[in-house]
Image: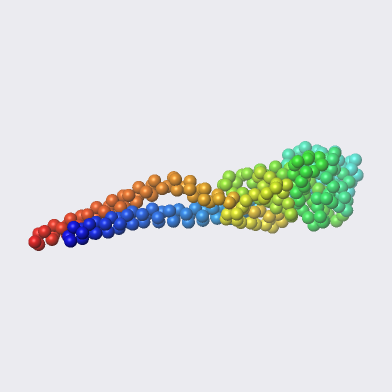
Amino acid sequence: MSRIKTAGQSLVELLLTLAISLLPVGSGLMIMFYQHDKKLEETARISVSEAIYSVDLALDRIHASAAAAMKLAGAACESAQAQLHDQIANAPHLRSLALTVDGRTYCNTLKTPYPADSIFPDATSQFRLALDPPATPNSVLLAYQLREDNLGVIATTYGMLLRKELRAFQTGLTLLLEFGDLYIWTDGDSRDPVRPSQAEFFQEGVSKKYGYTVKAGYAQGYSARETRLMMKQLFPSLGLVGIITGAITYWGMFRQRSQRTRSAASQD
């Protein structure tokens, strides 16, 4: 009977030791998962705000160029065109400048212009994306419209300006800019057959200055891949902590059992 009792006590001690050994491992993994998810969520939220700030600065330069060209609006194209070309030559961020009257382009630095009324649906629109423009097929331009009464200026830049701003966020996050019903991101735009995945920790924000939308999110499965990678890096350390904890626990119970055995033997 005493052997059965001793064996039962040993089994209980072994199971208790195993449970205590797994406790720091399980707790560490739970904390790691929680902190990882919070980090991804916070990164997405902060990146939206930072992207709006960064893109606004880039668009400010285009607005400033359009504002500088506005003094030529209404002037004859023969006298204004040379100054428009000079302005483009001195502004690397510009692709073209055009002057408009009543929404119709009458002077353009492009030999193959893009009709203004096909880009901007109304007079209040500011920034719009132009896909496959005649002068540069298979590309995307960002066009800006500035109006004063019936006169206006349209400034364009390559979509690469926007992609450059988005690529500054090297966090694994997929950032996308929406201008009306069209969008652009680091590796594509509205012409893509499939919209990029932003299924995990999705966040969005709207520029108060220019009205475009920034959408941010991680691709489907990104969090799981990152979690597996972290587990490979941290599990050996957590496992070692568990083994040490279990060994200390088992040693403590072994000493207590030895003391009880000696105490019982001395009483006999």
Q: Residue at x 24, y 52 (%)?
A: 251
How many numbered discs sit on the rendered protein?
A: 0
Whole-percent x, y for residue 178 in the image? 70, 53
Screen quadrant of the C terminus: bottom left
Query: Is residue 68 visible to the viewer in this orientation of the structure?
Result: no
Side of 6 relative to 175 (left or right): left
Query: Is residue 169 visible to the viewer in this orientation of the structure?
Result: yes
Side of 130 relative to 6 (left or right): right
Whole-percent x, y for residue 91 in the image? 75, 40
Whole-percent x, y for residue 127 in the image? 75, 51
Query: Which quarter of the figure has residue 260?
Result: bottom left
Foreground of the two, 158 or 228 = 228
Query: Which quarter of the figure has residue 107?
Result: top right
Foreground of the two, 49 or 44 = 44
Side of 38 relative to 17 (left or right): right
- Image coloring type: rainbow
Q: Residue at x 48, y 48 (%)?
A: 228
Q: Residue at x 59, y 50 (%)?
A: 219
Query: Which quarter of the figure has residue 21?
Result: bottom left
Screen quadrant of the N terminus: bottom left
Side of 243 relative to 219 (left or right): left
Q: Residue at x 74, y 54 (%)?
A: 181
In the displayed structure, 81 sits above or below 266; it is above
Whole-percent x, y for residue 206 in the image? 67, 57
